[in-house]
Image (cartoon, rainbow, N blue to C red):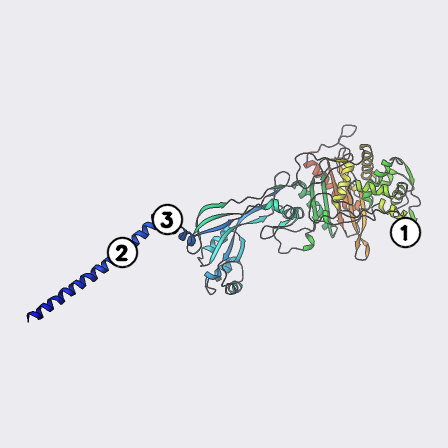
């Protein structure tokens, strides 16, 4: 019995000891875990803080691009012609979205896009993290979209190009695509200068990817540089209005006008018809994208005769009073016949220009020879690039024959057998206007006068200007008279070239001139393609446009009117009709 009690007592002590050991073990293990956790907390928060920070950043901090603001394009007075305005782009993360989400319906209605199309794209690109939903919308609309609180729909800031002058400057300024990359005009030619360089920044986002705040700037965006054009927006509007009006009035196929500053070679206005609105390209006609003043070539016709006259005067063989017999009003070269509108009989050199005699000019050129005529054309800038740096510039054709046939010399002298663009023709007249100096042309505003090259003497150019003055006062260009300003210029009418050669019933009406004629400020070239309705001569169609534009332009530029010998304004009456050229 005592032995049983003793065994029972030992068992109880052993049981108590085992229970105490288990308790101590559990307590010790718990304390060890607590010590380890405490140490880890101390280690992470005190010793190795960067680990938690990096893990948090991986989940919430992102690097985003910062778009560079594209440079502004302005006219010579700082008026904006192309600016970038802030807009919003809506994008989606398909991996976070449910294509059957009912909130997609009001989203697509707000944005004006296809509901079925968006749902199909979300299903098709379910494994992607980015697709565009709607690009470059108004910020107010973007806020309404984000208020729908659709998982996976996000918004980001971008820029959209806007053109305040619309179609008036479209052919010069050009336009960009949706990514603000230049596609036409100055936007294309100076794309790298205007674009700038994107930057980047670190931002804090919530679990849905919404930006909570900006944390730091990684790389600053470099905005694009501004471009200041030589255009005067006032003259550009004026030229565009008058050109559009004459094209409509004569139901013409199109038209072109260029205005140059005589003393600097700067382009003050350059317009075309038809045109387009770069702010709304939904109905864009690709045929209207060309800047025809630079890209389209034509035979200059009678507008080239003053250049031939300059060659004649420079040769010393002719003076303005040298007489030439143009009877009987035509001249035959084998099977080719050159004709005047009538038999002008005996004309001096000035009369050949004012009456626009093809026969007279052909006889003058025969005395000079083809090389001398061609050399003068080349010296004033024909047959070569203007150096303006505009995309798609056409240099034209200026023949250089080793042996000139008489008919080739004759045709060249009155503007056939060569091709020019409107800007080249304006440059040639600029040389006549400024006393014989050829300046490089520019679409960029110049801060100082350029270095020019003397091409002709002041005496020769002064004599040619008097011939051009006579064209307007008593010759084929009477409709080009500019009221209180005396002007000089030359008409031209040439057959348009079609698929099978010259079109018998389609013409280009031309006028090239300057004002004030004794001290020119502006040179202007007007070309109207295929005018209908019976009037198609340069003196009937293009000359009146020159008169209206030049008169208003000189007043806008505060050019002083010329005074007659009696001290009165040298104003001229308007003419209801004029000669033909």
Q: Quadrant of residue 314?
A: top right
Q: Residue at x 50, y 52 (%)?
A: 156
Residue tagged 2: 32
Q: Number of numbered discs present? A: 3
Note whether 13 is above or below 562 in the view shown. Answer: below
Whether the residues at callouts 2 and 3 have beta carbons within 8 Å, the answer is: no
Query: Is residue 10 visible to us here?
Result: yes
Instruction: Looking at the image, tell me whether mark 2 or mark 1 is earlier in sequence order.
Output: 2
- Outermost residue on the left side: it is 1
Where residue 545 sits: x, y (%)?
74, 44
**Secondary structure beneath disc 1?**
strand
Q: Residue at x 92, y 47 (%)?
A: 331
Q: Please name which of the two marks, 2 or 1, marks the residue nearer to the observer.
A: 2
**Secondary structure beneath disc 2?**
helix
Whether the residues at callouts 3 and 1 have beta carbons within 8 Å, the answer is: no
Q: Quadrant of residue 387?
A: top right
Measured in 3D between alpha carbons, the distance from the residue under mark 2 to the one under mark 3, in whole angstroms, is 23 Å
> In the image, which disc is placed on residue 336?
1
Measured in 3D between alpha carbons, the distance from the residue under mark 3 to the one under mark 1, in whole angstroms, is 97 Å
Where residue 278 sits: x, y (%)?
62, 50
Left or right: 505 in relation to 160: right
Residue tagged 3: 49
Classify 10 Å Cα crowding around label 2: few (below 14), some (14-19), many (20 and above): few
Looking at this view, is 1 or 560 the one in front? 1
- Outermost residue on the bottom side: it is 1
Q: Please name which of the two marks, 3 or 1, marks the residue nearer to the observer.
A: 3
């Amino acid at each position: 019995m005592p032995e049983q009690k003793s065994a029972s007592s030992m068992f109880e002590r052993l049981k108590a000891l085992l229970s105490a050991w288990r308790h101590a073990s559990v307590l010790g293990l718990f304390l060890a875990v607590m010590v380890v956790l405490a140490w880890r907390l101390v280690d992470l928060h005190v010793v190795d803080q960067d680990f938690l920070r990096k893990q948090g950043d991986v989940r919430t901090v992102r690097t985003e691009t910062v778009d560079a603001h594209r440079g502004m394009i302005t006219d010579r007075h700082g008026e904006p012609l192309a600016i970038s305005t802030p807009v919003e782009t809506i994008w989606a993360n398909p991996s976070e979205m449910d294509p059957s989400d009912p909130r997609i319906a009001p989203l697509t209605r707000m944005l004006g896009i296809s509901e079925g199309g968006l749902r199909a794209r979300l299903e098709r690109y379910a494994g992607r993290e980015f697709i565009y939903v709607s690009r470059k919308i108004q910020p107010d609309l973007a806020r309404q979209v984000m208020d729908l609180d659709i998982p996976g729909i996000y918004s980001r800031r971008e820029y959209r190009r806007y053109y305040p002058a619309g179609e008036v400057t479209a052919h010069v300024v050009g336009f960009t695509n949706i990514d603000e990359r230049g596609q036409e005009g100055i936007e294309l030619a100076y794309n790298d200068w205007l674009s700038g360089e994107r930057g980047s920044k670190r931002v804090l986002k919530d679990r849905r990817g919404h930006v909570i705040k900006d944390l730091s700037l990684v790389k600053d965006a470099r905005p694009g540089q501004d471009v200041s054009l030589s255009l005067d927006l006032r003259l550009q509007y004026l030229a565009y209005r008058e050109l559009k009006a004459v094209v409509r009035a004569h139901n013409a196929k199109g038209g072109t006008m260029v205005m140059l500053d005589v003393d600097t070679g700067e382009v003050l206005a350059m317009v075309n018809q038809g045109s387009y609105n770069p702010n709304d390209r939904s109905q864009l006609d690709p045929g209207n994208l060309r800047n025809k003043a630079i890209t389209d070539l034509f035979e200059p016709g009678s507008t080239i005769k003053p250049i031939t006259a300059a060659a004649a005067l420079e040769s010393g063989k002719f003076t303005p009073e040298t007489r030439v017999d143009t009877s009987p009003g035509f001249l035959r070269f084998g099977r080719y016949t050159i004709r005047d509108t009538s038999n002008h009989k005996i004309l001096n050199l000035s009369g050949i220009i004012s009456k626009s005699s093809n026969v007279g000019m052909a006889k003058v050129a025969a005395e000079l020879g083809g090389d001398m005529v061609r050399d003068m054309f080349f010296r004033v800038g024909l047959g070569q690039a203007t150096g303006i740096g505009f995309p798609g510039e056409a240099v034209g054709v200026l023949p250089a024959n080793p042996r000139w046939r008489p008919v080739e010399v004759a045709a060249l002298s009155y503007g056939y057998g060569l091709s020019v663009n409107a800007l080249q023709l304006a440059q040639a007249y600029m040389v006549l206007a400024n006393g014989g100096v050829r300046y490089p042309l520019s679409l960029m505003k110049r801060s100082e006068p350029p270095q020019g090259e003397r091409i002709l003497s002041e005496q020769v150019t002064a004599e040619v200007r008097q011939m051009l003055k006579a064209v307007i006062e008593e010759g084929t260009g009477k409709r080009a008279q500019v009221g209180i300003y005396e002007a000089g210029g030359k008409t031209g009418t040439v057959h348009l070239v079609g698929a099978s050669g010259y079109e018998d019933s389609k013409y280009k009406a031309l006028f090239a001139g300057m004002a004030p004629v004794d001290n020119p400020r502006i040179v202007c070239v007007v070309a109207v393609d295929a005018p209908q309705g019976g009037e198609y001569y340069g003196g009937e169609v293009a000359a009146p446009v020159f008169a209206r534009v030049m008169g208003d332009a000189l007043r806008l530029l505060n050019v002083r009117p010329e005074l007659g010998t009696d001290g009165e304004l040298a104003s001229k009456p308007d003419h209801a009709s004029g000669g033909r050229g």
